[in-house]
Structures are given as C-alpha cells and as structure tokens.
Image (cartoon, coloured by chain):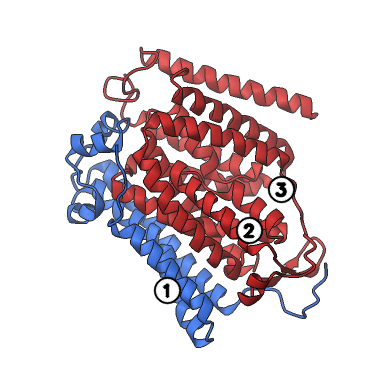
Chain colours: A red, B blue
Amino acid sequence: MSKRTLLFVAVLLVLMAFFAVSVVQAATGEAAPANPGGADSGLVWWAWPLILLVVTFFLGIMAVLGGVGGAVLYTPIIGGFFPFGMDFVRGAGLLVALAGSLAAGPGLLKKGLADLRLAIPVALIASSAAIGGAMVGLALSDAIIQTAMGGAILAIVVIMLLAKKSEYPDIQQADKLSTVLRISGVYHEPSADKDIDWKIHRTVHGLILFVGIGFMAGMFGLGAGWANVPVLNLVMGAPLKVSVATSKFLLATTDTSAAWMYMNAGAVIPMIVVPSIIGIMLGSLVGVRILARTKPSAVRVIVLVMLVFAGMRALLKGLGIWK
Amino acid sequence: MESKTGQSPGASEEQKRYAAVLDIAMKIGLLAIVVTFVLYLIGFPKPHIPVEDVSQFWGMKVKDYLEATNIEHGWTWVKEMGKSDFLTFGPIAFLASVTVICYLSIMPILFKRKDAVFAVLAICEVFILVLAASGVLPSGGH
C-alpha cells in the first residue's frame, strides 16, 4: 500500500470516528449535554465502561504496532471523546502507563535491554518533577489542561515526525558523570548476532531534559516514552534498543509518583481505571503477536494521524470551540 | 560496534533481582485488580456508590466529585475497604507500590557491593515515591 493510500485510509478512519462520536451524541439526544454519559444520557450504566474497554483494547494494539506508549494515545483520546472529567482521565492514564511498564519490565530487564544503572538516576529526576507536574495539573481547570495538552500533543507529533533515530550512536568518550556512575553496558543484538557495548555522554544535559519530561508526564497524565527515547538515544547516546527498553521500564517510576498524587487527590475512579488497564494490556498482548505480520511504519502513520486528531480535539475543546 | 570491553551481555545481579520481584508483584497486583473489580461489578460487598450511579459523577471536577459523593481524599479509603469500590483501591495502590518494593529488594545487593552512589540514589527514589504516596503534599483540586 502506498503512503498516499495509507494517508487516505487514516484520514477516512478519523472521519469515521468523528462521525461515530456525533452519532452517539445525537442518540443521547443532546449535542453537548452538561454531563454526557450521566444518568440522563439515555445510555445504560455499563455502556461507557464497555466502550472504554473496547477502545482501549484497540489503543493497546495501535500503541504496540505504532511504537508509541499507551498513555500518549489514551489521555487525549479518552479525554477528548469520553464523558469523563480530565482529572480522572489523567489519573487513569498514569495508571495505564504504569501497569504497562510494570508488565513489560521483567522481560526487558532480564534480557539486559533495559538498564537499571541508566534508569535509576534518570527516574529519580523525572519522578521528582512529575510530582510537581501533578500538583500544577490538578490545580488547573479542565479548559486550561485540555488547551495545553492539545498543544503538547501536536508538538509531540512534530517531534515524532522530525526526530531521527540512531541505532548505535558512536560515542567516542563517555562523559565524567556517566563514568563516575558507571553507566554503560553490553547487550546482545540478535539481528547482527553480536554483542554491543555502549556508553553515554551529555548526562547532565539529559538529566535536565528529564525534569521537563517528568513535569509534563505528571501534569498531563501522559506516558513519557515519546520524550524518553529521543533524549536517551539522541542526547545521551544510548543505543536505540537500550533507549526504548529503558524508557519503557523507567515509566513505572516516573508515573508512580504522579499517580499517587492523583490517587491522594481522589482522582481515581475504578470504573474508569480498571477497564482501561485491562483493555490496554489485552490489546498490547495482541499487538505484540501481530507485530511480526504488519508493517510498523504503516501503522505509525495511522497513529500519528490519530494523535493529530486527538490533539486538535483537545485544543479546540479547551478553547471552547468544539464542545 | 563490537564489544570491546570483554564484558558479557545480560543483566547484573541487582537487575535480575529487580526483575524477579517485579514479575511476581506485578502479576499479583493485576490479578487482584481483576478479582476485586468483578466483586465490585456484582456489588459484593455493597459499594459506597452503586455501579449504576457512578456515571452521574465521573464528568465532574475532582473537588465537586468528592463533595457530591461524600468521599474524603487521601488514605481514608483504607477505612472504607469493606465497600467493594474502595476494595478495588487496594490492588491499585499495591501496583503503585511495586516500584518501591523492587527498589527495596535491590538495596542489600548494592550495599553488599559497596555501591554507595547507587544505594543512595535508590534510597532517594524510595523517599520520593513514599513522599508522593503519603498524601502530605498538596494535590491541588479545583
């Protein structure tokens, strides 16, 4: 399938999603009810949790195939199209990312792809900043959060489009900090059947960037994989596979601190959290199984279009233009 | 790039320990979430908010939600675990505590190896996560 055809299919899917949302709203009898999905919405109580389970199942598949984290899709899409308050969506988004990271962690650590010595200092910085982000995010109104998140999602799409990847960055010399901390390692690359040893540099620069990454993760309830990987790979020079695996692993630490802030604020509703976790994890399992048979780059185009749509929706919803 | 250091690939001792503890704890947490959620759906024990009424509140801002449902924030849910909706908080909180458990599990290895820097970093991380979990930090609410 050519890229043009793929883009056409992606736009068509997005338009169909928009049409489906409009149909649901029309079926409930109101264009923008005060509490859509509430007792007067006309839907049975289990309708939205069931739709949530199904949608998050497909998000889980798309996340794996598109090479993105579940939460970067979850929070803007669920926040934009479901009748849940943004505080609860963000709390659920953090728990979804946390659950996904916990599930993937053991395998990545055992294979030596995720590196604990690389993750620990980074996670300390990011998790501390995530607390601050959560405190700020919970203090802001939904409109401001939606607007800011919409802008952030669109910026994420640009980063994902423009960011190059370096499979094996050629680091001539490790910097002083990473040498003192002994952040380096060796992993086995099956495709080349050889052992790759690696080291990093610009450690301080990377740690500073992780302050911002952690803050955003806490504020918007997004996973931080979209930012972790470019910083670990392009700024600090870790091999791509180590960067992706370590990013997935350290999400658990970053999101744990922010998730606790949302939980302590009361922003966790089991009827939203649990179907989301189950849906995303089942979808991820299916996604891993069909990954070998799909062309990830093709699916990535669809994922990027979904993110653009979700980002626009959040931005316009926050500005009160598209209620 | 070929391995020049002669190191063997694979996980370090603390990494293997972390992975083993994480694997068990994660599976326990996920199973418990499913079990408690099923109990909540069937209404056993009786929930604080009946399942069919949750939709009245989930569109609210969290401050309004707490007022409307007469729920207190913070760790007060522990006292209410006799109700099935609060019962589901137990495994959710457990999953959110798994990282702390894993960090604590690797500390003996770090101390034994006299890896002071990483032992201190791990202690700091545990402190940060416990601080976040404690509820002493203001968490906004609007």
Q: Measured from the top left, where is residue B90 in percent x and y?
A: 30, 56
Say which of marks 3 and 1 sits in front.
1
Say which of marks 1 and 2 sits in front.
2
Q: Establish whether labels 3 and 2 are both on one chain.
A: yes
Mark 2 is on which residue type? His
| Left or right relative to A196: residue A26 | left
Q: Could one spot residue A294 in this view of the protein?
A: no
Q: Which residue is mark 2?
A: A205
Q: Which residue is mark 3?
A: A292
| Left or right relative to A2: residue B98 | left
Cβ atoms at labels 3 and 2 below 8 Å apart: no
Where B70 falls versus A106 (above or below)?
above
Mark 1 is on which residue type? Leu
Q: Quadrant of the C terminus of chain A?
A: top left
**First-in-chain label (3 vs 2):** 2
Q: Which residue is mark 1?
A: B104
What's the residue at 64%, 69% (across, down)? A112
Q: Quadrant of residue A115?
A: bottom right
